[in-house]
Image (tube, rainbow, N blue to C red):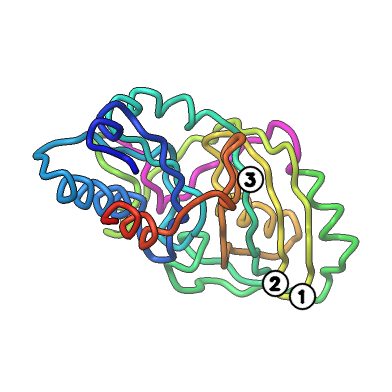
Amino acid sequence: MKTEEDFKNGQVLLIDKPLTWSSFQAVNKLRWHIKQRFKIKKIKVGHAGTLDPLATGLLIICTGKQTKEIHTYQGQIKEYIGVFTVGATTPSYDLETEIDQIFSTEHITEELLKETTKQFVGDIQQKPPIFSAIKKDGKRLYELARKGETTEIKARTVTVSHFEITKIDLPNVEVKIVCSKGTYIRSLAYDFGKALNSGAHLSALRRTKIGNFSVENASSIEDFIKNLEN
């Protein structure tokens, strides 16, 4: 049974983030319940790497003194499974926004799909989506994007160490990706579509690993709260 002292000294919590929740909401929910459970006014709680609301899976949440170590978890390699839907793009590169362009997919074969993955393994240049939490001039990019403001985003180097197609059921292509900190799987889906001479967007995403931590060992938010209250 975890005590107030345990949480203050620092815990590393593995949470399986549910669909539609922001990472911020998950942190707030856990902080509120920890404060309620131990009748404390203040405790530090933070996460080690944002997951988009439309993604599920592993979120590392640190409490108390352990929040000082968040950067060490953020820097570790990540593993994702997801679905790229080819033949259409969206402004956000995922399902947060409506489809804005349709492309031909008649030329897309299993061989072309698998051959194209090779272009995205190793150190690659990638532009983050305009609908992202990156700050520019003190404002988050998604705030500007939602107002219809365009902004120039610089490409940056990220590393993809593994890019595997696990199932093809066109227009859906299931993928497994292992990559460095700062990689946007949405951008990867968009760039992959362009490389196919078509278009693509991310229609599902689940983070399965961060370093040696696996979602298989993570708790749902409901189970964490139940265990805390018991």
Quadrant in the rendering for residue 211: top right
Q: CA distance from mark 2 to mark 1?
A: 5 Å
Question: Is residue 133 inside the magenta stretch?
Answer: yes
Relative image position of residue 187 (x, y in whole percent): 57, 50
Disc 2 marks which amino acid? Answer: Asn
Provide residue 138's location: percent of width, then percent of height. Answer: 24, 35
Q: CA distance from mark 2 to mark 3?
A: 19 Å
Quadrant in which residue 77 is drawn: top right
Q: Residues within 10 Å of mark 2 (few under 14, many from 20)?
A: some
Is there CB contact under 8 Å for labels 1 and 3?
no
Q: Is residue 157 left or right of residue 139?
A: right
- Label 1 crowding class (10 Å Cα cut-off): few <14, some 14-19, many 20+? few
Frontmost of labels 2 and 3 is 3
Q: Residue 169 — which label?
A: 1
Q: Nearer the viewer, residue 60 or 37?
A: 37
Magenta span of residues: 120-137
Tag 2–tag 1 contact (CB < 8 Å): yes
Q: Quadrant of residue 175?
A: bottom right
Q: Secondary structure at mark 3?
A: strand
Residue placed under numbered mark 2 in the picture: 172
* Residue depicted at x 45% and y 63%: 54
Please, what is the three-letter code of the amino acid marked with disc 1? Asp
Between discs 1 and 3, the one toward the N terminus: 3
Disc 2 element: strand
